[in-house]
């Protein structure tokens, strides 16, 4: 039976690949996509999610509008990485479908409370504002959350937005701190693993060779998106941050890491948004997350390319 998941995203080219990968994979039952302001503001992230579902021929998957800004801080966006539309590199038509009227947080709460014994897997790949609001709004959902598989944070790799803070956590550190202290089972994909999940030029050639509307859109988006990180880090390809979360749910063997205590800095202006990962267990504090550190890059890329080709 397909695993029920909710994807919480701020599309974003890498969010787009994560969403398309999930929609192409029969192992997963995407109950809905909730949007959160992050890479670009609302309503753009919602428009982008609708465009992607239409591109994939999956308008059966409902989209719900979520947070317009973080819990406490001013919204910080990343057009410098993703472009003004958030999914620059492709020119998808304006959506003909609309988001549902139900609020994203209410959808998350209602879905979790209605879940059977197997529970719901939440897949936040943007700032954690919606997830934190759902848990704060209805703490009784925590026992119904099978797993929170999230992209965010960094430890030995540092940050990509400040020297120590990764974007998703930096945008809403208060939400992240609440989620990491919620008691929900968390599997974390920090920059330490996502910076190894690179789509190299030869991989992108395979995507171009798919020669379908979805393949062309993915190739165009990644062509645009990779330039920032190649220039900044000297990578030879784009890090597919968000697709790591979905690939893990499809094939967990692709990833490895260990259980660690993770805390989030919310006060210091110097280090706000830092995920303090006790990788060596020096605090003796019980672990609250499975922190991923390594990926079988080729296996991950093969999965992404194979599934994108199915749409
Ligand atoms: O730091 C990478 C994360 O920030 C990814 O989720 C990307 O989409 C942006 O949201
Ligand atoms: Ca994202």
Image (cartoon, grey):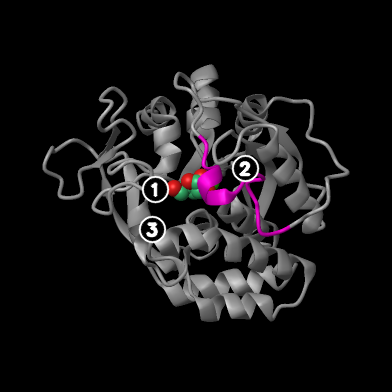
Instruction: Please provide percent x and percent y for residue 291.
Output: 33, 50
Q: Quadrant of the C terminus?
A: bottom right
**Would residue 88 be counted in the magenta stretch?**
yes
Marks 2 and 1, the one that precedes in the sequence:
2
Q: Secondary structure at mark 3?
A: helix
255 relative to 281, above or below: below
Q: Is residue 107 left or right of residue 147?
A: right
Q: Quadrant of the N terminus?
A: bottom right
**Cα distance in 3D space between marks 3 and 2:** 32 Å
- Residue position marked by numbered label 2 in the rendering: 6
Instruction: Give the image quarter of residue 232.
Output: bottom left
User: For residue 188, which numbered disc appears in the image?
Assistant: 1
Callout 1: CB less than 8 Å from ligand 1:
no
**Cα distance in 3D space between marks 2 and 1:** 16 Å
Instruction: Please provide percent x and percent y for residue 22.
Output: 64, 57
Give the residues in magenta.
77-90
- Residue position marked by numbered label 3 in the rendering: 232
Label 3 close to label 2 by CB (< 8 Å) = no
Marks 1 and 3, the one that precedes in the sequence:
1
253 relative to 276, above or below: below
310 relative to 158, above or below: below
């Amino acid at each position: 039976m397909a695993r029920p998941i909710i994807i919480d995203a701020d599309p974003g080219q890498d969010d787009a690949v994560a969403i398309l990968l999930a929609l192409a994979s029969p192992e997963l039952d995407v109950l809905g996509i909730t949007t959160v302001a992050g890479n670009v503001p609302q309503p753009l992230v919602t428009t982008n999610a609708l465009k992607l579902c239409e591109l994939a021929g999956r308008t059966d998957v409902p989209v719900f509008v979520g947070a317009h800004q973080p819990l406490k801080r001013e919204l910080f966006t990343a057009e410098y990485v993703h472009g003004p539309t958030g999914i620059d590199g492709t020119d998808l038509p304006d959506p003909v479908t609309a988001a549902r009227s139900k609020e994203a947080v209410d959808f998350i709460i209602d879905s979790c409370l209605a879940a059977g014994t197997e529970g719901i897997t939440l897949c936040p790949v943007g700032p954690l504002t919606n997830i934190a609001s759902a848990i704060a709004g209805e703490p009784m959902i925590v026992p119904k959350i099978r797993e929170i598989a999230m992209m965010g944070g960094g430890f030995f790799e540092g940050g990509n937005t400040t020297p120590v803070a990764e974007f998703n956590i930096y945008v809403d550190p208060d939400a992240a701190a609440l989620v990491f202290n919620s008691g929900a089972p968390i599997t974390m994909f920090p920059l330490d693993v996502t910076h190894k999940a690179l789509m190299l030029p030869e991989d992108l050639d395979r995507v171009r060779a798919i020669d379908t509307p979805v393949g062309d859109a993915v190739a165009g988006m990644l062509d645009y998106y990779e330039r920032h990180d190649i220039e900044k880090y000297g990578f030879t390809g784009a890090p597919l941050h968000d697709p790591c979360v979905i690939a893990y749910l499809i094939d967990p063997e692709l990833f490895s890491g260990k259980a660690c205590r993770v805390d989030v800095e919310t006060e210091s202006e110097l280090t706000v948004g830092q995920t303090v990962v006790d990788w060596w267990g020096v605090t003796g504090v019980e672990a609250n997350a499975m922190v991923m550190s390594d990926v079988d890059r080729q296996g991950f890329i093969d999965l992404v390319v194979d599934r994108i080709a199915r749409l």
